[in-house]
Amino acid sequence: MTQIDDETGLRLAFAVAKRALDHGNHPFGCLLVGPDGTVLLEQENGYMPDQDMTAHAERLLATVASKKYRPRFLAECTMYTSAEPCAMCSGAVYWAGIGKVVYGLSEARLKTMTGDHDENPTLDLPCRTVFGAGPRKVEVAGPLLEDEAAEQHKGVWD
């Protein structure tokens, strides 16, 4: 397999986020890429149908990944995600052992778009801060392609 560059990985995550929106969910999506460039998992936001406030795409993917793969392998994997993982999702990524996160839309910018929306009361706590609180290293790249990532949220939180 060939390696996936960050822009390609993010655009794949944006496509998953678009699918989530098409399926009646919030426009968040992510994927896990193995060390050889293979897409291992994809995950849409899972808020609907149960209105599960904890069913963020990144948390759901981290749960599946931690059941399917061991931390030593996950340490060599990259999560590409349409938006910066929130504090909850960052914790899940950390505990699963995923080694790198690449995100599009920052939490800070997302918060300006969502405000205090009941379905997304965004925590402006950077994932780097959460990851930095533990001894396990998680590499972070982002925000990248942020304007493109923000487009998916236009009109969603009005």
Image (cartoon, rainbow, N blue to C red):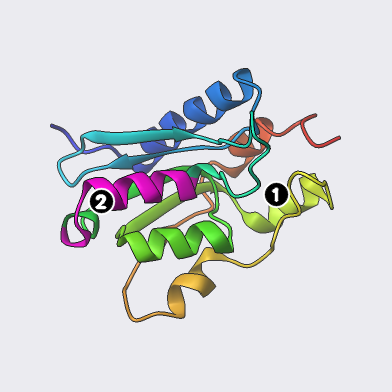
How far separated are the C-alphas under marks 1 and 2? 25 Å
Residue range (magenta)? 58-72
Residue 64 visible to the viewer: yes
Q: In which quarter of the image is the C terminus?
A: top right
**In the image, is residue 49 part of the stretch drawn in magenta?**
no
**In the image, is residue 64 part of the stretch drawn in magenta?**
yes
Q: Name the residue under label 2.
A: 77
Of the two numbered discs 1 and 2 on the same chain, state the one appearing first in sequence. 2
Which amino acid type is shown beneath numbered disc 2?
Answer: Cys
Name the spot of residue 35 as percent of width and height, x first. 18, 47
Residue placed farthest to the front in the image? 50
Residue at the spot x=44%, y=35% of the render? Answer: 43
Name the spot of residue 138 as percent of width and height, x first. 35, 66
Q: In the image, is residue 126 above or below residue 118?
A: below
Residue at the spot x=13%, y=32% of the render? Answer: 1
Asked which secondary structure carries label 1, the reply is helix
Which amino acid type is shown beneath numbered disc 1?
Answer: Leu
Q: Are marks 1 and 2 in contact (CB under 8 Å)?
A: no
Q: Name the residue under label 1.
A: 110
